[in-house]
Each structure stands twice: as C-alpha cells, then as structure tokens.
Image (tube, helix red, strand yellow):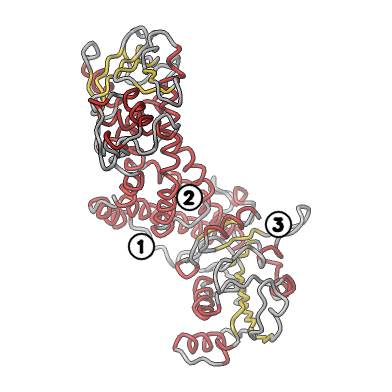
Amino acid sequence: MFGYQFYPTPEKLAAYIKSKLDMSGVRRVLDGSAGKGDLLNVFVTPRTGRRIKTLAIEIDPGLQAVLREQDHQVVDSDFLQYWGGDGFQAVVLNPPFADGDKHLLHAIDIMKGSGQIVCLLNAETLRNPYTIIRQDLVARLKALGADVEYFQQAFCEAERATTVEVALVTINMGQRKHNQQYFADMEADKFRPERDEQVIGNEVAQGDPVAALVERYEVARGAGLDMIETFGRRAPLLGEALFLSTKDWDGRMSGQQDVDDVSADFLEKLREQYWSQVLDMPQAQKYLTSAAEATIREQININSKMAFNKRNVHAFLERIVGGYREALEATIESLFDTVTSTHSYYSNCGENYYLYSTWKTNDARKISRKIILPVNFFDDIFHRFSSSPSRRSRYGEDDLNDLDKVLSYFSGQQDFVSILEAIATAVKEGATGDSIESTFFKIRIYRKGTTHLVFKDTDALRRWNIFVGTRRNWLFKDYGQAPYETMTSEQQAEVEGFEGKRNYAKEDNIGPRIGAHRMVSALIAA
C-alpha cells in the first residue's frame, strides 16, 4: 500500500517495546519512522491519565495525514535529516530494514548522550556486520551497554506478515543533567548576530528568500535554545532576585525536565511563526488569489509543527503547485460571477457584461471591456480620497487584487503594477481626478463610491471570457482552436453569438499564457 518496506508494528510487539522503556521520566516520545502510528498509539493514554506527547517523523504525505488525524505531532519528514530539539526523552523505531543501521546510529547521535532508544532491526544487521556502517553500529551498541533480543516470529501474524528474524535493541543512556559549573561557558560565543546576519544577507543577495527565511529561523532557534538552557542552568543561583524567577517556570526550572519542556514549547511556537511567513514573501503575495491563499494558509496551520528547513519548505511549496491550478481556476469563475452578476444589480454597474446567444442557451455572459464596481476610495470623514477602499465599500482589496492576478494569468505578464498600487500612487501625488493607469486597467475613482475599470489588454479579457464560456458549456470545448471553416453550423452559431466571424481568431493555445505551475514555481525558485 505504502511501499515494499512498510511493515506496521504488530500491536503486541508495540506494547512490548513500550514495556522496555522506563516511563517515569518520559513526557515526549519520538517515532522516527512512524508509518500510520501503530507503534506510537500504545503511548496514547486515557484522558484521565498522564498524557505522553507523541512526536512523529514520516516521509509519506498520506501517512502524515493519518498520523495527524490520530493527534500525533508530525515534526519532520526525513528522520536521517532531523537533528532534534523537540524535548523528547525516548525514541522508538521500526525503520525500513534496508536502512535500519543508519536510523539507529542517527537516533544515538540526536539523543546526545541521554535518554532511551528502542529500535527494531533485521537481525542480519547485527549478526552479519559486513559493512563499515554495521561494524560502527555494533561497536557503539557494545560501548553503550545496549540490550539486544532476537525474535523469529514477531511479524508472522502482522498486518504484513514476514518470517524475517528481528532484533530488538534497547539503549538507556540515563537522564541528562545540568552542567553544575554555572559560569564555565560565559566566554563562549555561541550566538554571533553579526555572523548570522552576514549569512542571511548572502542568501538574500543570491535571490533565495526561502533560504534566507530558514537562516533567520536557525538564528532565532539557536539564540532561544541557548537562552533557555543558560537560564535553566543558572536558575538555582538567581532565586527570586530576577523577575523571571523560578516560579515563572513552574517553580522547577533548575531541573532538566523543565528545560526540555520549555525548549519544546518554544520551538513549537517559533515554527508556527516562521511557517506563517512563507506566504508573506512578495513572490507569493504577487500571484496567489485570496481564495488560494486562504486554502494554503489552512495547510500551513496543519504543517506548522514540522521542522522549518529548506527541505520541508520546498516540499510544501511543491505540493502547493500541484493543487494551485484548481484553486486559481475556481477563483477565475467566482470573480467572473462577481463582476457579471453580484455587482450588476447595483446602480451604474448593470453594463458590466453582455448577454450572447448560442444554440444551447440565451443566458451566456461575457465581461464588458469597461466595468463599474461599487468600491469606494473616498473617505467621507476626512473628505478626501484614500489609498484603500473604505469600510462601507461593497468591494474589497482582495477582489481588486484577484482581478490583477487573473489578468496576469491570462496575459502572461508576471511583473505588473496592480490596481491598488496605481491608486495609492495617484492619491499620494494628488492626481485622483485624472485617469489612473495600472498595468492591466485604466482607472477612474469617484466620490459617489464607484470605481471604473477599462481593460487595456483585450486579448487577456477575451481569454477569460472564453475560459468561463467553455467551462460552462456556453461555448464548445475547442473554441478558438479550430478554423472557422471546419466548424459545424452549431459551432459557427456560437462564434457569431460570442464575437462574430470577423473577430474570431484561431490560436494554438487559447487558454492562459502563463500556467499556474509557473506562477507559483516563481516563488519557489526566486
């Protein structure tokens, strides 16, 4: 179902793995190859009991969704690229057997000398250490005093049965203690803003806003974790003398438990903060319609528990590309209805569209070259024009921005001056009485509360009208791509009704001049 190496942990084996852990000091458990949660589920206690926070790493997006539905916090997609920081005291693993040695070695590394690990391996990984990696693993397990048990029938009655012999490795490295030499690191230069800002500046100069955002996150992450660790280590010396007294940290900040908990909470909030900034980048704002942005922000809220790194950010943005076209095309139709139907009933807005007849319907519509919208830029309180619509305006900034993005989609013009930018410039220069020009429109704003827009790019407008017409079967599917002479009489009638034979033009591509994939890819690659 999810790959040839996907072998969910049997329930009895999962329970046994949990029994190998000393749970007295465990508040967070990480599963580095979580699958659909079979191993983590044994750590979920009734609501009346002590809640163990379950953290998951899983590479398959479908399984990530399954894990989130079970209230497991997905913190990353690739365990071998993950470097911790989420305050877990135990790691459990049922990794792909082909890379089990690498997963267990990485688990030992990220535990940094403390905590517990229980890992399932193909028994051959330890019985036949013929590679350098396996030899390194065997040596480190011996040095750590690891306990190894072998099971021949562990997966015989599993969801995916196999007779492969497995090894269960248990490592207990003990609890991490604070360094009692409180001032030993006072001269350490762990956080150097001048160095970090230089790195970020280089990323920006190279035109990589994602890398720059990730670098800023790393700086904030390092500074925050250093501060928490330092305060926790020195809290016993401070007593009540500092306003950040130990009471503000549950009265127990001198213990490692509190450092882990505070660090994990800090990282969770920091990730949410930086994930929310992904769509605040100018490249995203330039092309995303309001509906598409709202949908994607919902996905970001789901994704915000994940480690914030270039790999995860790019993977997220690439998934957006896959679903963006559908969201954009829904906005194209919705905005068409807003212009031709919703606002056509308001005073002075009735000429926003033309009706045209086809052999199928007499109710087909197309947007006029000039449209009037009930969007008011006149401030009734200060009796002057404003650079943004007033609160009593029936039409908002999102809709005006969407108009620009739809025209960008159909024209191929990626760099453009928007309606709002053009109006803001005119207001600043006191030129609101004149015709205002953006890239796609000639604009007039009136005190009576309307805005008049004339489409400058009639070809892009034609494409928009054809797009909606073909989607709603007002026009035949291949409209604009077939020679007039080869059409049926019904198709020729549609041409006459929509624009007339004289204005009909055959093109190889009557659709958008810039694909949605390219538009969103611009923010990924920029």
Question: For the residues marked 3 and 1, what is the alpha-carbon distance in whole angstroms?
Answer: 38 Å
Mark 1 lies on residue: 189
Q: Dot 1: within a 10 Å radius of its alpha carbon, few (fewer than 14), some, or many (20 or more) residues?
A: few
The residue beneath circle 3 is 51
Which of the two discs, 3 and 1, labels the residue nearer the N terminus?
3
Compared to residue 258, the image places residue 33 above or below, namely below
274, above or below 402, in the image = below
Which residue is depicted at the point 55% across and 75% down?
Answer: 96
Residue at disc 1, secondary structure = loop
Q: Is residue 237 left or right of residue 418?
A: right
Mark 2 in CB contact with mark 3 (< 8 angstroms): no
Name which quarter of the figure residue 14 lies in: bottom right
Q: Which amino acid does label 1 sit on?
A: Asp
Q: Is 31 in front, or is 22? A: 31
Is 101 rendered above or below residue 277? Answer: below
Q: Where is residue 160 in the image (x, y as percent from the top left)?
A: 66, 73
Label 2's element? Answer: helix
Mark 3 residue element: loop
**On residue 270, which mark appears?**
2
C-alpha distance separating marks 2 and 3: 23 Å
Residue placed furthest toward the right: 48
Tell whether 374 sits left or right of 180.
left
Kindly identify the amino acid type of the residue bearing the numbered disc 2: Leu
Q: Are marks 3 and 1 in contact (CB under 8 Å)?
A: no
Question: Which circle's residue, 1 or 2, is located before the other in the chain?
Answer: 1
Q: How many marks?
A: 3
Quarter of the N terminus within the rendering: bottom right
